[in-house]
Amino acid sequence: MANPSAVCNGHLHHHNHQKQNNLLKSGISKKNGITKGMKKNGVSNGTLYKKTFIEHFEQAPMYVAVFTFVGFAVGTIFGYLRDFMRAWGLEKRNIAAEREQQKDFVPLYQDFENFYTRNLYLRIRDNWNRPICSVPGPQFDLMERVTDDYNWTFRFTGRTIKNVINMGSYNYLGFAETDVNALKTVTIELEKYGTGVCSTRQEMGTLDKHVELEKLVAKFLGVEDAMVFGMGFATNSMNIPALVGKGCLILSDELNHTSLVLGARLSGATIRIFKHNNMQSLEKLLRDAIIYGQPRTHRAWRKIIILVEGIYSMEGSIVRLPEIVSLKNKYKAYLYLDEAHSIGAVGATGRGVVEYFGMSPNDVDVLMGTFTKSFGAAGGYIAGKKDLVDFLRTHSHSAVYATSMCPPVAEQIIRAMKCLMGLDGTTQGLQRVRQLEKNTRYFRRKLHEMGFIIYGNDDSPVVPLLLYMPGKIGAFARRMLEKNIGVVVVGFPATPITESRARFCVSAAHTREMLDTVLNALDELGDFLHLKYSRYSKSAHPELYEESRLELED
Amino acid sequence: LDFSTPRYLYWLFCQFELITCSYLMEPWEKVLFYSFNLAMLGLLLYTTYVCLAFHASSAFQLLCSFLGNPRENSLSVVK
């Protein structure tokens, strides 16, 4: 099997072919899969990757890790101090507590469990849950919020901050819009059907809109049939238990989304985790599964299913689909691909990672995706062979118990998908995909040049910028808001404790000026907060020409 | 980069605040933290001063004894 060797980016001590398990997380940039010069016996059996696959997971210098720990240590010490003061009544307690009569019972509110939330998260809590009061397009309006008692309570001043540039919404293709012409069909359907469905799919909740949408989704993806659900999270968590059960094996990626983890745990199957995007780890698990079988009885597993995502939203990395498909064919396992962030966002015509790698949708057994991210709606779908979808129609928990998707939302997806496929007579869909690609590449390239540490694949519109220190999380988000840019910062527990980051989601609706504004603000802020940790920044020379003039519009 | 301007010093102080999370602290916590840090720093400087003075003076005495004896020896040789 073609096994691309890691081309190191300066880390010479990692250059050994035996131990390739710690490839990506230890800061090596993998380059082109073509390894003709590096193979041992010189037999070239072609490559699995038809285009270059470049991912970056650079490690910061050592002093950054030291400072991060210093920050957390100081935070923890002060946390203990505050908890002590709260416990001994020297400070007012704002958290939930039992009544006086119940003090001797088994405690309801364990103080230590929420230590981190109470002491570290609370100090920077004003950067999350910010209410917005407009459509989450490329710019939005924020409600102004102040706190008088250091983030325990908030109050609204009544003013709105207008036209904040939106770098956090999953609006990849820009379909979250309020343009009346664009939403014409949605308004018609809203007036025809109303908003509620008031039933589940198996009772009276299957409308002709759902049938139309399912046929369209199947045509869009190039598969036999599809089924849509009202909620993206519930699509994963309710359908995985229908597909696997006890006696089956689930091989799930380290960094899978909570919905996949929940679905896997609910199913009752055995779960084994392989390292993030690491094919050697996956192959080892597959071999062990087939050789040793089930834990006690050593019988063969009833089913082996691999759960991966198209784009991982915290890392910005794209799944290594060709390798996984070849592994699955070799070891006769099934593949469940969650394309929540990648449908519409990657691929030449927006059809997701399957098209991005030039593969056929028949290679993947279960294609799952959501309509929340690129289509500006809500809900999810599962697509694949007709037998699979018919099985899910009868056996899925979602179909039996969950209300189906409401008609205006279904119409929004239909119009977005028709736009993407070009069925509405314009090339607007393709233009959006191209614009997103251009924006992504421009944004990532500029951030690399400035010297920030960016994770992920060069083609993914999710751009995590590493901040590392807990103090900088709050400072970064607040200062960006002062500059009228809304960003999403993430810390522990969504990311590893030392790798807190700011996550940008590039959209096709962002204009070049908006991106330039954001980039200039990031440049300034990067210098002020000292965030430019990268030791491999690309070009130190000034621009020789103005890039926008030479760019040829396609 | 001008290493002595007040702006650079302010920037350095901001970095210190961010790294040690004192940026996130309430004012009384900051007072506590800074006074603790300054006290520790003062203690460190005082200990350094005392120890260094002691070691420096003892080293100087040793050096003097080395210099002193050969001079006397050479005198005796000359005599």
Image (cartoon, rainbow, N blue to C red):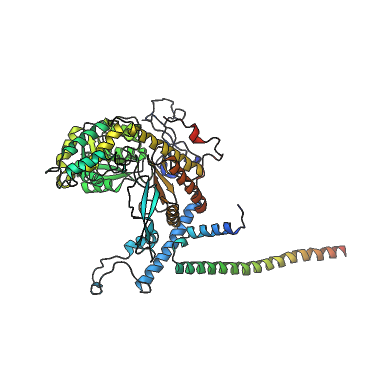
Task: Determine the residue located farthest toward the right in the rendered image.
Answer: B79
Q: Which corner quadrant holds the C terminus of chain B?
A: bottom right
Q: Where in the figure is residue A128, as x and y percent of width and height?
A: 36, 55
When asked about the image quadrant of residue A39, the answer is: top left
Q: In the rendered view, tell whether residue A173 sits above or below residue A528.
A: above
Asked whether residue A265 appears in the rendered view, the answer is yes
Q: Looking at the image, which is closer to me, A54 or A327? A: A54
Left-right relation of A235 to A280? left
Residue at x-position 24% and y-position 37%: A414
Q: Closest to the observer: A342 or A74?
A: A342
Res A177 → quadrant: top left
Residue name at image x 52 percent, y 50 percent = A527
Give residue A450's position: percent from left, percent from top.
50, 44
Residue extending furthest toward the front: A180
Can you give x and y, in whole percent of width and height, for residue A201 in the image? 15, 43
Q: Quadrant of residue A340?
A: top left
Q: Total marks drawn?
A: 0
* Residue A489 seen: no
Looking at this view, is A275 or A357 the one in front? A357
Q: Nearer the viewer, residue A546 or A105?
A: A546
Place of residue A161 in the rendered image (x, y in percent of width and height, measured from the top left): 39, 54
